[in-house]
Amino acid sequence: MNASRYERQLLLEGWGESTQNKLSQKTVFVAGAGGLGAPVIHYLAAAGIGKLRICDSDRVEISNLNRQVLYTENELDEPKARAALKRVSKLNAEIDVEALEERVDASNVNELIAGSDIVVDCLDNYASRLVLNQFAVNTGTPLVHAGVQAMYGQLTFIHTPITPCLRCLLPDKITELSPKPIVGAAAGVMGGLQAMEAIKYLTGMGTNLANEMLLWDGADMNWQVVPIHRDTDCPVCS
Ligand SMILES: [Zn+2]
């Protein structure tokens, strides 16, 4: 490990070389390499997470570039997972990066995620999110959830049975806009917070946003943290 690379985080009280070594042994599964995934992947790679598994089945499109900060016009039409791997390998050659050009579904989720220490949900639809959630509940793997739309975002740290699962929090019928309106910087805010939650969990520093949901209104610049509860009738975690 090149300690100079991590100098500024090694200065944190309680971080030190042992924490940095701990991070270098960890594997993070990043589901989605879009608006949320791009900052998550960047910051986790920069922090020296040992292994990143980047999972996305889409290709880079020009309309992605207002928010998906890992890509440039040079990567148009390339598979996102591969382009993200290329980019972060240039940022930090000390880490292992795996590009998975797949869409997470019930048939492949175990194979894709097994062995990961934490999952970061950077997806853009609830059908796939619920597949991640089911895996997280079945295996006791922590899941950092965020969603973003227009100038708003939400964030929570899921780790059942200590916390509710994602299904507990959702109404029976979900309507989603596609494509969703989004200000690129809003995805940057929420993705940055997701990276923070993953880094805190993996280093054991700070506390995670468990049993609470952060609601961010970027239009009026308000932050609210509200308690969330398990649904005792939840079909997934109860
Ligand atoms: Zn539940």
Image: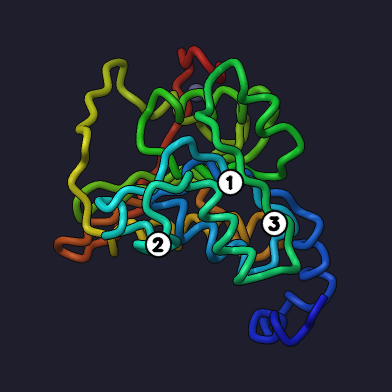
Say whether mark 3 is within 8 Å of ligand 1: no
Residue hosting label 2: 74
Q: Closer to us: mark 1 or mark 2?
A: 2
Q: Closer to us: mark 3 or mark 1?
A: 1
Find numbered disc 2 in the image and state the secondary structure of the residue it sits on. Answer: helix
Picture layout, residue 22 above or below residue 32: below
Residue hosting label 1: 54
Type of the residue with mark 2:
Asn
Q: Residue at x 74, y 76 (%)?
A: 14
Type of the residue with mark 1:
Ile
- Occupied quadrant, residue 162: top right
Dot 2 or dot 3, earlier in sequence: 2
> Position of 78 compared to 27: left or right?
left
Q: Residue at x 30, y 52 (%)?
A: 64
> Position of 146 compared to 221: left or right?
right
Q: Residue at x 36, y 31 (%)?
A: 125
Disc 2 residue crowd, few under 14, some 14–19, many 20+, Cα 10 Å: few
> Position of 88 compared to 170: left or right?
right
Say whether mark 2 is within 8 Å of ligand 1: no
In x, y percent, where is residue 213?
39, 46
What's the mark number on residue 202? 3
Find numbered disc 3 in the image and state the secondary structure of the residue it sits on. Answer: helix
Dot 1 or dot 2, earlier in sequence: 1
Disc 3 residue crowd, few under 14, some 14–19, many 20+, Cα 10 Å: some
